[in-house]
Image (tube, grey):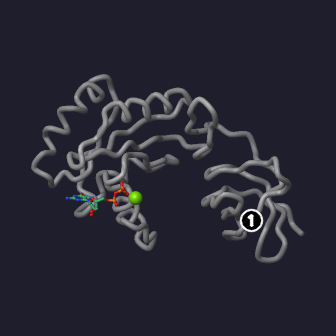
Amino acid sequence: MAVLTGQVVAAFSRRFIVATAAGELPCQVRGRHLRAVCGDRVEVRRDGDAGVIEAVLPRASLLYRSDAFKSKAIAANVTQLAVVVAARPSFSMELVQRCILAAEDQGIASLLVLNKADLPETPVARARLDLLTRIGYPLVTLSALSDVTPLQSALRGHTTLLIGQSGMGKSTLINALFPGADAVT
Ligand SMILES: Nc1nc2c(ncn2[C@@H]2O[C@H](COP(=O)(O)OP(=O)(O)O)[C@@H](O)[C@H]2O)c(=O)[nH]1
Ligand SMILES: [Mg+2]
């Protein structure tokens, strides 16, 4: 049984997929108290085709959602938050600002992604983002249905979390960036 280090690339409650130098391993986590999330760097004890996460290494950043009662980790070691909006359905400015604040709290860069640039109402949506772009947040405008190359260079060198309301086009973006991802839209 070899001990490897790797990174969690998928998390399904108590089951994980960890990318290691020896390939991707399905893993469970040791004990009941250890918690791993997507992006965590972990030590894995490999046993044949599977593994057990023995330790979670220190996190450079942690994004989580919380209310008055509980908090739930979303992803670790993210370096960039890409907040996806579109002209239709309309987006909540408050939510965009809350996302940016969560990123700032963890020292994570934020990127605004205005999707569905093919829609005629796009300039109105663009104007709503004006305050944020004027204070320095970068903006990428694109149409996930036709061309995602404007986003590709902004992703290079980063571990990026895509976030945004339902219907903004996140799954469509994932499928265009990673053919074969098969995200349901
Ligand atoms: N017109 C237009 N529609 C888009 C674009 N990207 C996504 N959509 C559509 O928007 C809807 C929601 O997309 P989806 O990827 O499921 O959004 P998600 O909820 O953020 O994952 C789907 O019907 C997509 O086909 C785009 O660039 N232009
Ligand atoms: Mg989706």
Q: Quadrant of residue 73?
A: top right
Q: Quadrant of ligand 2?
A: bottom left
Q: Indicate the position of residue 70 as horizontal and vertical percent values.
A: 64, 36
161 relative to 83 in the view: left or right? right
- The number of numbered discs placed on residues in the rendered structure image is 1
22 relative to 52 in the view: left or right? left
Q: Indicate the position of residue 14 as horizontal and vertical percent values.
A: 71, 59
Q: Quadrant of the C terminus?
A: bottom left
Q: Indicate the position of residue 56 as horizontal and vertical percent values.
A: 76, 47
- Eyeballing the image, is 180 above or below 38? below
Closer to us: 139 or 52? 52
Q: Residue furthest right?
A: 1
Closer to us: 129 or 69? 69
Q: Residues within 10 Å of mark 1 (few under 14, many from 20)?
A: many
Q: Which residue is mark 1?
A: 27
Residue shown at the point (81%, 47%) measured from the top left: 33
Q: Secondary structure at mark 1?
A: strand
Kind of residue sitting beneath label 1: Cys
Residue shown at the point (22%, 63%) measured from the top left: 146
